[in-house]
Amino acid sequence: MWRDSRLQVLLAIGSLTVMAGAVIAPNLPEIIHQLHFNPGLAGSLVSLHFLTVALSVPLFGILADGVGALPVLVPALVFYALFGVAGAAMSDLIPLMVTRGLLGIATGAITAASLGLMGKLYQGEARSQALAYAASTISLANIVYPLLAGWLGSFSWRWAFCLYGLALPLVIAASAILQHQPASRSHWTTASSDPAIASLSNALPQLLRHPHTLQLLLALATTSGIVYASIVYIPLYMRTTLAANTILIGIVLASKAMGATLTSALGTRSIVKRCGHLGAIALGYGVIAFSLILLPQLHQFSLILPTAVLFGMGFGIVVPSLYGTLSHRASIQLQSSILAAGTGSAFIGQFLSPILLAPVLIKFGISTVFYTTAIIALSAGLLVTRLGQDKVGSAIVIK
């Protein structure tokens, strides 16, 4: 599948969802210093796009299913580049926050359309493998983009915002290569007279209200929140416990991402074939919980490093399996909508994670944060495995 140019373009486009936050995060201290921003308010520059992505991506998923994914994707890539690069020209907090919010909306459209295309271009086992490749690409992007942004930011933080311009070449690639076979007419043009279209409109709310779908969406939000917490609290733990410098912290975070990348690309498919999606999800949550319980007991870099890799491996199993299970619940006509709903839930989890865990950190300390997230991971695993009592793979179809 790596030779499929359509998949290569989709993976490159999907990596832009990571770039949205990765560009500003390494340069935020310098932005605050140079522009004299309030640190408390300026911190929202990193997380604001999570909220606008979460709010917009389900709407763009519905739009992509209605008019086609490519007509949504191409303009979104253009606006992504424009809103992203525009941040380099801002010197006041409010205009910069506006560009960040608009960038999140464009990111939501890109996410919905690209995932929808992936769900429609690949079926069955190939879809599961494509989603695993997407998860591994995002993990790699979490390593590469912060390094690029930090390097460009060493010259000027404004130069780092030029990375958003990489979306423009992908406009050409998407227009030329992603020529899937969309519906011959818009789903919305004759909705009142076509029974099949009316059935599509009824099927999506039915799918989203189904308890199994809601449980999967909650699991995606929970998993993303846990992973985001690890990005925040593992460096804090290493700094307070080991007095680790930024290089050691960067190595641990990169190792975590590498564990997720290798597992998603090379191991998830065989685990799913052997255990099924639900069995793989349960295994992945168990690995995540075990590594989170183990971390506060470790006080040596040589032990924290493999534990971080283990955490990444659990993430690399859980996320593609959750998306695969969610995708299998929907018919081909609803792939953009259902996968967009999953991504929206994931971004909500990232947005809420530091808000919900901050009181735990303040009152009980950082070790309790790890234990709390481990309990949450185990609870999410139990929640999803309950789906095994019923047949979760059957799609809601258009009659």
Image: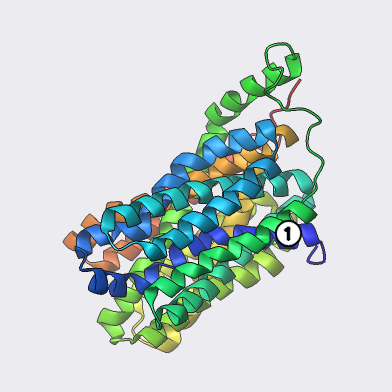
* Of residues 336 and 303, the one drawn nearer to the viewer in this rendering: 336
Q: How many labels were placed on the picture?
A: 1
Residue nearest the observer in this picture, 80 or 280: 80
* Residue plotted at (52% across, 51% down): 107
In this figure, which colouring scheme has been used for the structure? rainbow
Between 48 and 129, the residue placed more toward the observer is 48
Residue 151 is situated, as x and y percent measured from the top left of the image, at 46, 82
Name the secondary structure under disc 1: helix
Position above or below: 387 against 16: above
**In this picture, residue 90 sits left or right of residue 331:** left
**In the displayed structure image, the side of residue 394 where residue 32 appears, left or right:** left
| Horizontal arrangement in the rendering, residue 324 relative to residue 383 (left or right) | right
The image position of residue 51, as x and y in percent, is 40, 47
The residue pinned by badge 1 equals: 173
| Residue at point 75%, 14% (across, down) | 194
| Amino acid beneath label 1 | Ala
Above or below — where is 296 with respect to 155?
A: above
Dividing the picture into quarters, in which one does residue 234 lie?
A: bottom left
Q: Callout 1 environment at 10 Å: few (<14), some (14 to 19), or many (20+)?
A: some
Residue 361 against residue 303 in the figure, above or below: above
Q: Is residue 388 visible?
A: no
Please report the residue visible at 33 percent of the width from the left and 80 percent of the height from the top.
Answer: 238
Residue that sits furthest to the front in the current view: 89
Please state the horizontal and vertical placement of residue 261, each as a whole percent of the image. Answer: 61, 70
| Residue for point 72% across, 54% down | 174
- Residue 387 place in picture, x, y as percent: 58, 39
Which quarter shows the N terminus? bottom right
Q: Residue furthest top?
A: 193
